[in-house]
C-alpha cells in the first residue's frame, strides 16, 4: 500500500502548488499534506514557480476573506521558513518544451492548464519510477496518472492509479 511506503521508507516527491497551499491553510487535505511534509525521511521537491503560485493562492484566499490578516502573515512566514527544506528545481527551456509536449498530448481531451503542465513536465524530467507526484488538483492528477506516474492526492479518500507499487 502506498501510505505504508510513504510513512516507513521515505520517498522522493514533487509537490504541486495545489498541495503546498494546504500546509498553512486549513482545508480538505491539509492534515494528510502536513503528515507527508513533516516526515523527515522524505525528500521534497518543488518547481521554482511554485513559490509564486503559493503566494498568489494565499493572497487570493485573503482577498476572498478565507484568511484573516494574521493567518495571511502566518502562512507567508511559515512558508518562507519551510521552503528551506525543499529542493527547488528551475524552470528550464527543457521543462517548457516538455510542458508543450504535454499540452499537445492531452490538450484535446483534458483541461490541462499552462502552469500545471509545467509542474508535471518538471516532474517527468527529474523523477524516477519510485517518485510520487503530490497534487490536489483533480485534472492534473488524472493527467499525471494517465502519464503512468504515481500520484498522491491528499484530498481524495481513496487514491487510485498508483502504478509503481
Image: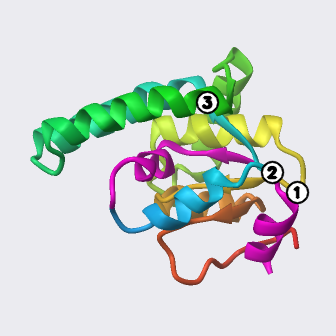
**Label 1 secondary element:** loop
Per the image, label 2 sits on a secondary structure element best described as: loop
- Dot 3 falls on a residue whose secondary structure is strand
Q: Please state the horizontal and vertical placement of residue 6, each as a whole percent of the image.
A: 77, 65
Using the image as rendered, state which of residue 69 and residue 119 is in the foreground.
69
Dot 3 or dot 2: first in sequence order is 2
Numbered tag placed on residue 130 in the rendering = 1
Q: Where is the C terminus found, in terms of image quarters?
A: bottom right
**Magenta stretch in the rendered image:** 1-26
Place of residue 13 in the rendered image (x, y in percent of width and height, measured from the top left): 73, 48
Q: Earlier in the sequence, mark 1 or mark 3?
A: 3
Residue that carries the numbered disc 2 in the rendered image: 41
Other-residue count near label 3 (Cα within 10 Å), few / some / many at <14 / 14–19 / ≥20: many
Q: Is residue 126 left or right of residue 78?
A: right
Characterize the local packing of mark 1: few (<14), some (14-19) or many (20 or more) Cα atoms within 10 angstroms: few
Mark 3 or mark 2, which is nearer to you? 2
Residues under numbered marks 3 and 2 in contact, where contact means CB atoms less than 8 Å apart:
no
Q: Which mark is residue 5?
A: none
Residue beneath the point at 19% across and 37% down: 70
Which residue is located at x 42 percent, y 53 percent? Answer: 22
Disc 2 to disc 1, C-alpha distance: 15 Å
Q: Which mark is residue 47?
A: 3
Res 77 quadrant in image: top left
Q: CA distance from mark 3 to mark 2?
A: 20 Å
Front position in the image: 164 or 25: 25
Please tell me whether mark 2 or mark 1 is closer to you in this view.
Answer: 2
| Mark 1–mark 3 distance (CA, rounded to whole Å) | 19 Å
Amino acid at each position: 500500500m502506498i501510505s505504508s511506503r510513504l510513512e516507513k521508507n521515505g520517498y522522493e516527491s514533487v509537490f504541486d502548488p495545489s498541495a503546498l497551499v494546504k500546509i498553512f491553510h486549513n482545508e480538505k487535505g491539509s492534515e494528510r499534506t502536513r503528515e507527508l511534509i513533516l516526515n523527515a525521511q522524505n525528500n521534497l521537491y518543488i518547481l521554482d514557480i511554485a513559490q509564486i503560485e503559493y503566494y498568489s493562492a494565499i493572497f487570493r484566499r485573503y482577498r476572498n476573506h478565507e484568511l484573516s490578516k494574521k493567518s495571511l502573515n502566518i502562512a507567508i512566514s511559515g512558508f518562507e521558513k519551510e521552503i528551506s527544506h525543499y529542493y527547488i528545481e528551475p524552470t528550464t527551456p527543457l521543462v517548457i518544451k516538455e510542458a508543450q509536449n504535454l499540452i499537445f498530448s492531452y490538450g484535446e481531451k483534458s483541461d490541462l492548464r499552462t502552469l500545471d503542465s509545467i509542474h508535471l513536465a518538471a516532474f517527468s524530467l527529474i523523477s524516477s519510477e519510485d517518485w510520487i507526484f503530490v497534487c490536489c488538483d483533480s485534472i492534473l492528477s488524472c493527467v499525471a496518472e494517465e502519464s503512468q506516474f504515481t500520484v498522491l492526492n491528499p484530498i481524495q479518500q481513496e487514491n487510485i492509479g498508483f502504478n509503481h507499487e
